[in-house]
Image (cartoon, helix red, strand yellow):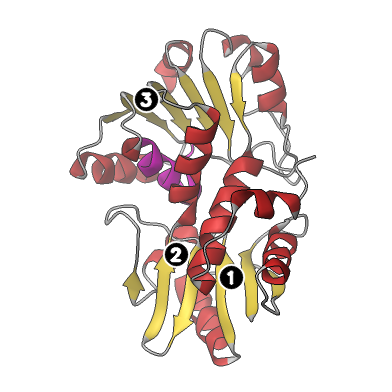
Amino acid sequence: MKLGLVGQHIQKTQSNRLHTWLGQQYGLDVSYELFDMVLDDTPALAALLHRLGEQGYRGVNVTHPYKVKAWDIVTERRNTPAGLGALNTVVFEAGGIVGTNTDCSGFGRAYRAAQPGQNPGRVFLKGTGGVGRAIAFGLAALDAEHLYLYDEQAASQAQLLADLQACGARASLVAKADVEDCIRGCDGLVNATPVGHYSTPGLAFAAELLGGQRWAFDAVYTPIMTEFLQQAERAGLSLITGFELFLHQGIDAFEFFTGIKVDPEVARRGVSNV
């Protein structure tokens, strides 16, 4: 079974290791290729996906910065909220390209494992692109008390707000002048930007703003302990690492590719969280 990953700056991903490991455990001969490339627009991504389907790939994962573009390419979406607007997993079928978003479902699984029985509360979400949209809808499904959205791209955050409110979620935008006060008053902090990734190092939230919140999540998992999570740990917050999202979204993706139910502990043995 031929699988792959389409994105930028993906050479340190463990997706190939996870999917080939799961193939071995469940009796499938799986190959997983990395397509680390710059695609100028949605038609370029569509052309690549159609070409991979013609070359016999069963499916591919789609990561930054192509998740939103993938939404309009597929012919069918499954197991994904109608307003989410981003996809990270596609399969090639006779009738076309079918997509889903396992970031959304994977975040829900990761949160419930880390914070069993606890509502996410008031959450500050930084970054409203592809992964931010998935996490926002995942938090809405967890019945978060309120989502505070912030992104330097005004159109992106406004669109996510409209889509969340259309689905009945409680959310609002945060003006730049109000960011610090809002962060201090929240229960959870989410970094859904690339800041902290090995290719874009930095601190997603200023250290002096941390403390008093209950939990922190960083979508970045290369490295796993980003500067943000290191500072959050020092401030006493409970951590959900990007590795946990990676693991659970990968399990959901493998199940989408194959129809095989995966034991999470089997998956965890195949990849490293250090």
Q: Earlier in the sequence, mark 1 or mark 2?
A: 1
Q: Secondary structure at mark 1?
A: loop
Mark number, residue 174: 3
The answer to whether residue 231 shows anywhere in this view is: yes
In the figure, residue 87 lies in which quadrant?
A: bottom left
Q: Earlier in the sequence, mark 1 or mark 3?
A: 1
Residue 166 rendering spot, x and y as whole percentages: 19, 44
Q: Are marks 1 and 2 in contact (CB under 8 Å)?
A: yes
What residue would you read off at disc 1? 39
Identify the residue shown where x is 73% and y is 44%: 222
Q: Amino acid at mark 3?
A: Val
Q: Main secondary structure of the magenta part?
A: helix
Q: Amino acid at mark 2?
A: Lys
**Residue closest to the eye, 252 or 34:** 252
**Residue closest to the eye, 186 or 106:** 106
Identify the residue shown where x is 22% and y is 39%: 165
Residue 12 rendering spot, x and y as whole percentages: 77, 55
Q: Is residue 18 above or below residue 48?
A: above
Q: CA distance from mark 3 to mark 2?
A: 25 Å
Q: Are marks 3 and 2 in contact (CB under 8 Å)?
A: no
Q: Which residues are magenta?
A: 127-139
Q: CA distance from mark 1 to mark 3?
A: 31 Å
Identify the residue shown where x is 56% and y is 40%: 193
What residue would you read off at disc 2? 69
Q: Answer few, some or many: residues within 10 Å of disc 1's Cα (few below 14, many 20 plus, some between 14 and 19).
A: some
The question of residue 271 being in magenta is answered with no
The question of residue 136 being in magenta is answered with yes
Residue 223 rendering spot, x and y as whole percentages: 75, 40
Identify the residue shown where x is 63% and y is 67%: 5
